[in-house]
Structures are given as structure tokens and as C-alpha cells.
Image: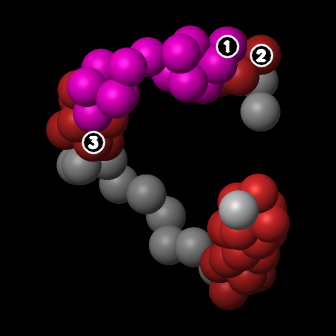
Amino acid sequence: MTPVVQDFLTTFDRLTDSERLDLASEILKRIAYLDFPPLSDDNLVLISEEIFLQLDEEESAY
């Protein structure tokens, strides 16, 4: 992840819920018609593992 993207995400985390929803909506509108290449099985596995690890972290916080 580049420093610019990391700064963007840090700023996003500081926004109110309403601001986050507005921003997410705008980003989704802008990327809806981009031509993304299909994800490989390996990419899907890596993404899934990352999501499950994040969920495990959140559950352990409770």
C-alpha cells in the first residue's frame, strides 16, 4: 500500500459515519464502470484469509 493510500485511509477513519457513507458512495459511483480483470483463485484465497483474520481480531475484542 502506498503512503498516499495509507494517508487516505487514516483520514477516512477520522470521518464521521455520515461522511464515511458519503465518501464510500462517491467512490463506488466512480469505480462502478471500471474494467477490472477477473480475480484469480489465489487472489480470492488471499483476500478471504485477510477478511477472516480481521473478523477474528474484531471478535476477540468482544
Q: Which of the colour schemes (rainbow, by chain, secondary structure, one colour) is used? A: secondary structure
Residue at (49% x, 64% y) in the render: 37
Q: Please, is residue 13 above or below residue 32 in the view?
A: above
On the rendered structure, is 62 left or right of 24?
right
In the image, the segment drawn in magenta is: 7-21
Residue at (77% x, 33% y) in the render: 1
Type of the residue with mark 3: Leu
> Residue 11: which quarter of the image?
top right
Q: Helix or strand or loop: what does disc 1 sit on? A: helix
- Dots 1, 2 in contact, CB < 8 A: yes
> Residue 48: which quarter of the image?
bottom right
Type of the residue with mark 1: Asp
In the drawing, what numbered circle is on residue 28? 3
Q: CA distance from mark 1 to mark 3?
A: 19 Å
Q: Residue beneath label 1, please?
A: 7
> Can the viewer see residue 21?
yes
